[in-house]
Amino acid sequence: MAVGRNVDCHHGQRHIVPTNDYWIGHHEDALPLLSSAYQGSSSNVGRALNACCLALTHAALGDKAQASKWLVLALQHDPDSYLLAEATAAVSAMP
């Protein structure tokens, strides 16, 4: 699974999203930060990256419905996002 690997998420002028290394073992703590970053992102690229990070985090928590929701949003914002393949693999690997 992707969690634990150093994956940069969107860094914007108004917010900074931690990398996966930051939230190892602290997935629930990361959710409000990631949600805030998603809401604060003004570009489709940024929203897609933050949505991928949310999908990865929900996948790590075992919440397939939420992980799938965020993956769909990521695809809508930027189908070429560099984190889509990893987020898709994490969600697809869920039971």
Image (tube, rainbow, N blue to C red):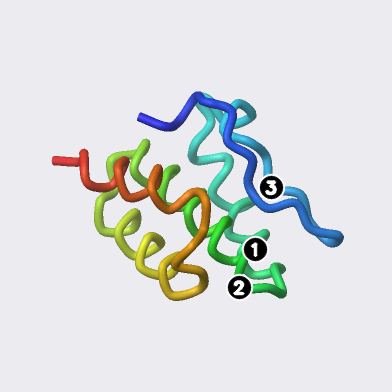
Considering only vertical position in the picture, is 87 above or below 61? below
Which residue corresponds to mark 1? 46
Q: Position of residue 3 (x, y in %)?
A: 45, 30
State if disc 3 and disc 2 touch (CB < 8 Å).
Answer: no
Choose the circle earlier in sequence order: 3 or 1.
Answer: 3
Q: Write the residue at 41% across / 68% down.
A: 75
Q: Quadrant of the N terminus?
A: top left
Q: Secondary structure at mark 2?
A: helix
Which tag is nearer the camera, tag 3 or tag 1?
1
- Occupied quadrant, residue 93: top left
Seen from the viewer's position, the closer of residues 62 and 76 is 76
Which residue corresponds to mark 3? 17
Q: Residues within 10 Å of mark 1 (few under 14, many from 20)?
A: many
Q: Write the residue at 59% across / 28% down.
A: 6
Question: What amino acid is labelled 3 in the image?
Answer: Val
Q: CA distance from mark 1 to mark 2?
A: 5 Å
Q: Position of residue 86 (x, y in %)?
A: 40, 42
Question: What amino acid is labelled 2 in the image?
Answer: Asn
Which tag is nearer the camera, tag 2 or tag 3?
2
Q: Position of residue 44 (x, y in %)?
A: 61, 73
Which residue corresponds to mark 2? 44
State if disc 2 and disc 1 touch (CB < 8 Å).
Answer: yes
